[in-house]
Amino acid sequence: MDYQETINWMFNQLPIYQLQGASAYKKDLTNALLLANHLNNPEKNLKCIHVAGTNGKGSTSHMLASILQEAGYKVGLYTSPHLRDYRERIKINGGEISEDFVCDFINKNKTFFESNDMSFFEMTVGLAFEYFAKEKVDIAIIEVGMGGRLDATNIITPLVSVITNIGLDHTQFLGNTLEAIAFEKAGIIKPNIPVVIGEFTPETKSVFLTKTAANNSEIYFSSDIIKKEYSSDLVGDYQIHNKKTVVQTISIVNSKGTYKISEDNIKSGLLNVKKNTGLEGRWQQLGKYPKIICDTAHNKNGLEIVLKQIQKEKFETLHIVLGVVNDKDLDEVLPLFPADAIYYFCKPNIPRGLDSGILQDKAATFNLNGKAYNSVSESYTKALQNASKTDFIFIGGSTFVVAEIL
């Protein structure tokens, strides 16, 4: 199979959460361990930082990679989902895995994958671990897919575990209270391995303290420890917390003696995240007159911060290109949006995309008014046509909406 055929085969195997939702979630590590054993446990040859959290884990992972690259290390970076090309998920020093490596890995192991019902995510995690081990990276940043305790990445023993924050997202899998979700995320905490917590609440803090005590793990609440402020090319307001989490994590990595990361490396790493890692879709500016911003925030906690940041901007009229997936709790997110904006409702081009007409009808009950369009590109084009130079256009609601306009 060539690259496109290989990717199509992977997508068409067992359901992939990115496209299908609930039916793709596996509550078990059996397959991940089985695959790792089949591959001769490449993860055991990796030094890793493991990053979980409801929001910010992607930005945090990219910041960590950027800083370590600035310090001269060969850095593996595993994240999900991708925006345009599958290979964005697996990078070394900002460069994507080659098409040939992906094809060879799948072709070589295809019979095993089929006979053991490996999911898309399990195959991808195995691919990342094998690639990083073969390329002999100095360190790998491994982002959790969803949750933590039962995520396929949770077969590693990292140098440090990181939990950025806890919010109500993916509640159909992880539980519908902050404590329940914190319990799932805290599943990445390993015996005697230090843990960095980004943001916390009284409910989640007690879960983390209980788990770290049981594992004899040191715990660091970065928001209480890191007071210094750093500039970054990631300018979303929500990055303030992520930067503190990153700086505390680097401090722990430094303390182990194997790595040497200077203050200058931290500063330059935070200022060059996009250049070093290729990260996109985080308060990303696509135009100046009118100002056009896209952001992948898609749950209550993330959208709240982004929408507050929009209100700080100076503009005449606000245009919002909005699309969501069909398992989104609209009663939770739609009240966050301003009524004094013009809306362009759209459906992201995936099976999980919510019909734009349904979104339009639901939004109207919250006094959010606009027209429904057949595609993301059509709604974005219309917003561009309608906006004057002094207006502001925001594109968001889903990672997949942003992916279609980048």
Image (cartoon, helix red, strand yellow):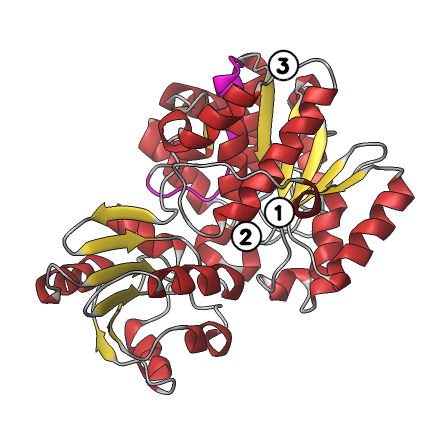
**Amino acid type, callout 2:** Asn
Q: Which residue is at a point 67% across and 27% down the rendered structure image?
A: 251
**Circle 2 crowding by C-alpha within 10 Å: few under 14, some 14–19, many from 20:** many
- In the picture, measured across the screen, residue 226 lies left or right of residue 378, that is right
The quarter of the displayed image where residue 338 is located? bottom left
Q: Which residues are magenta?
A: 68-84
Return the mark for residue 260. 3
Q: Position of residue 38 (x, y in %)?
A: 67, 25
Circle 2/circle 1 CB separation < 8 Å: yes
Looking at the picture, which amino acid does disc 1 mark? Thr
Residue 205, image x, y percentages:
77, 56
Q: Is residue 320 left or right of residue 215?
A: left
Say left or right for 194 vs 97: right
Residue 158 image position (x, y, % from top left): 71, 29
Q: Name the quadrant of the C terminus.
A: top left
Q: Position of residue 368 (x, y in %)?
A: 31, 80
Give how far apart the Cα atoms at labels 2 and 1 are.
7 Å
| Circle 1 residue | 164
- Residue 351 lies in quadrant: bottom left
- Closer to the N terminus: mark 3 or mark 1? 1
Which numbered tag is attached to residue 55?
2
Determine the residue positioned at 88% across, 40% down: 215
Q: Nearer the viewer, residue 359 or 241?
A: 241
Does residue 284 sit above or below 66 in this rendering?
A: below
